[in-house]
Image (cartoon, helix red, strand yellow):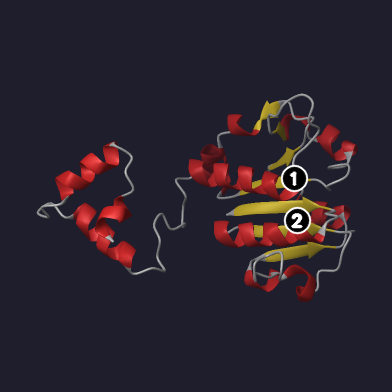
Amino acid sequence: MLNIVLYQPEICPNTGNIIRTCFALGAKLHIIKPIGFDLHPKWLRRYGAGRMLSDIRHEVHASYEDFYKKYHDKQIYYVTRYGLNLYSDINYQEVYDQTKEVWLMFGRESTGIDKQILQNNLSNCIRIPMVSAMRSINLANCVSILGFEVMRQLDFQDLSKFEVEKGKITSLIMILTSKTNPKIKELKKLQQKNIVIKKMLF
């Protein structure tokens, strides 16, 4: 399971967006207090596109000390501009094979993860590369980048790789997987030319 840990988040819209991302990833969200906003659904619903904490697996920890007491034995990767390794250098598949979990911690928007925590876990600090003039990027974007990289390495385990809500896609899948369908060769040619398949089918 993918675990997303927010260390003392400060901005409600970011956490709302992250709730939505965790829902999409099937990830568990950990929020470490103190935080800079109220976790009441009326504040989070808008930014989570209707998704709330109650829609995902989550834990709210009263402090970092409380979180550490419970999860100190976990192999956590700390996302920070001080990271010695790039986030893409980590073999998350190997981590998952060993523990059946992947843990990622993200810091507060203003100052990141406490430096003492980083110093104690320097070998597990990872960085998102960016131009040298940029100090950081949006917290919710960071979670998306890392979360989907982990799931990519896990071959998007338990995630749907095709649209499941619209009936038309079923027809497309049947056509693409049918060996006898006369359109299959034509469809493959269109794919090679990067022509959108649905223009032909629908």
**What label sits on residue 138 in the rendered view?**
1
Residue 52 point in image, percent of width and height: 68, 70
Badge 1 or badge 2: first in the primary sequence: 2
Quadrant in the picture for residue 122: top right
**What label sits on residue 24 in the rendered view?**
none
Tell me if residue 64 can be seen: yes
Q: Residues within 10 Å of mark 1 (few under 14, many from 20)?
A: few
Tell me if residue 73 can be seen: no
Secondary structure under the numbered disc 1 in the rendered image: loop
User: Could you tell me the amino acid type at mark 2?
Assistant: Asn
Residue 37 point in image, percent of width and height: 87, 64
For image coordinates 15% across by 44% down, the residue present is 185
Examine the rendered structure and indicate whether residue 48 appears above or below residue 86.
below
Classify residue 82 as left or right of residue 102.
Answer: right
For image coordinates 22% across by 43% down, the residue present is 188
Foreground residue, 98 or 62?
62
Examine the rendered structure and indicate whether residue 185 appears above or below residue 53.
above
